[in-house]
Image (cartoon, rainbow, N blue to C red):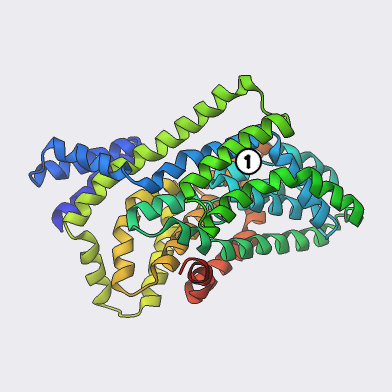
Amino acid sequence: MGLALGCFGIFLFLLIFAVPLGHAMAAAGIIVMTIDGINAVGAVQRIFAGINSISLIAVPFFILSGLLMESGNISKGIVDFARAFFGHIRGGLGHVCVVSCMIFAAVSGSAMATALAFSNLLSPAMKEDGYETEFIAALQACGGTLGPIIPPSILMIMYSSFANISVASLFMAGIVPGILMGIGLMICCYFYARKRNIPRLPKISGKERTKVVGRSIWALLMPVIIIGGTMAGFCSPSEAGMVACLYGLIVGKVVYRGLKLKDLPQVFGRAAITSTTVLILMGLANMMGYMLARLNFASTIANFLSSFTDSSILVFLIIVVFLLVLGMVMESNAATVIFVPVLYPIANAFGINPIQFALVVVICECIAQITPPVGALLSATASIQGIPLQGTVKHVIPMLAAQCLVLMLVVFIPGLSTWLPNLLIG
């Protein structure tokens, strides 16, 4: 137990002194492995084992498919579709923003990409209609949290590699809660628009809607390929990501003509850098996680919790609070790779459904991305809108409350996360 606490202590000490996350994990793991008598070759083997997973092949492809969608003007087709069907409701452009984020989430798997995808398309029109800039930034950030919840999800892929759970099952688990979170954000938009008396957009006729669907169908087929192919068993998540990349490349170049050949090196370069960053973190975290598992750290924590309660719900809530607080100061990918190997065995020890627990972890880490002081999504959208982060807080609070309500529903009603996986995958 002393070595395990020492491992965490070294890691936290280095973070306090602004040592990069990957370096801090590597140093903590190597120091403790050396003390425990494991040589440098063993450290390298653990790093390689952390990324030697077939499910992780999907990560770079989903990152690339989202970038191709963003660069190829495919996002505009999504916005046009959402405006045709939801724009006439009170708070129309707010609903368009949320629905667009939900559809884009079904392609990118990334919170940041989802939050920033529609900024240039929707922000000017929303400001013209009377939406405050602070509200726009808050809504786009909260819409971004849907990226890793609605499948596909990079966080879910990372989780599955640590916990050995089917990626397809995790993908299916996120659909219902993701839709509920989207509906919660739309309700917030409705009441905001009613309070500020924002005018409704004109309702589009059925004939015009048909035309919009015809123009947008190529953009809408991209999430169908990913989710539908995975659900139907035609392809694995990795194969679906590959097909989505090829589809996005062709549609962005030929149909919407937003993707230029000269842009491809930059798009592929961004995808490579982002993917490499994620995979390096996973490899280094696996070395640190291996030492914590070797030293029975998770069992020690589980025994400690068992000493004062045998309630799985209470333990579940303790973990939820821990993750939400942790997310205020740590980036979500880092929190996943560091703490999932510790928390997953604890959840198993208390009989918590593994798929339900996985989804709760993902939701917690997404919600934490809009909570200060770090609030990565909120900081990014506020920066793009040119406003201070503090101004968005009053608008984030009701949206955060709606998302936390869905989180509690998932905690107390397992069927919300397990129904679709059991129905479609078994």
Q: Nearer the viewer, residue 58 or 118?
A: 58
The outermost residue toward the front is 234
Q: Secondary structure at mark 1?
A: helix
203 shown above or below 66: below
Query: Which amino acid, by three-letter code, is at mark 1?
Result: Leu
**Res 203 visible:** no
Q: Which residue position is annotated with label 1?
A: 116
Residue at the image position 26 percent from the left and 39 percent from the top: 48
Residue at the image position 50 percent from the left and 26 percent from the top: 269
Q: How many marks?
A: 1
Q: Position of residue 86 (x, y in %)?
A: 80, 57
Horizontal side of residue 176 vs 166, given as left or right? right
The outermost residue toward the bottom is 310
Q: Position of residue 6 (x, y in %)?
A: 18, 50
Residue at the image position 39 percent from the left and 54 percent from the top: 159
93 shown above or below 21: below
**Res 197 visible:** yes
Q: Position of residue 207 (x, y in %)?
A: 91, 53
The outermost residue toward the left is 37
Horizontal side of residue 422 vs 43, given as left or right? right
Q: Nearer the viewer, residue 212 or 336?
A: 212
Q: Quadrant of the N terminus?
A: bottom left
Q: Quadrant of the C terminus?
A: bottom left
Q: Which corner quadrant of the image does residue 215 belong to?
A: top right
Q: Which corner quadrant of the image does residue 57 belong to?
A: top left
Q: Position of residue 345 (x, y in %)?
A: 29, 64
Residue at the image position 33 percent from the left and 50 percent from the top: 338
Q: Nearer the viewer, residue 198 or 293?
A: 293
Horizontal side of residue 150 vs 80, given as left or right? left
Circle 1 packing at 10 Å, graded few (<14), some (14-19), many (20+), is: many
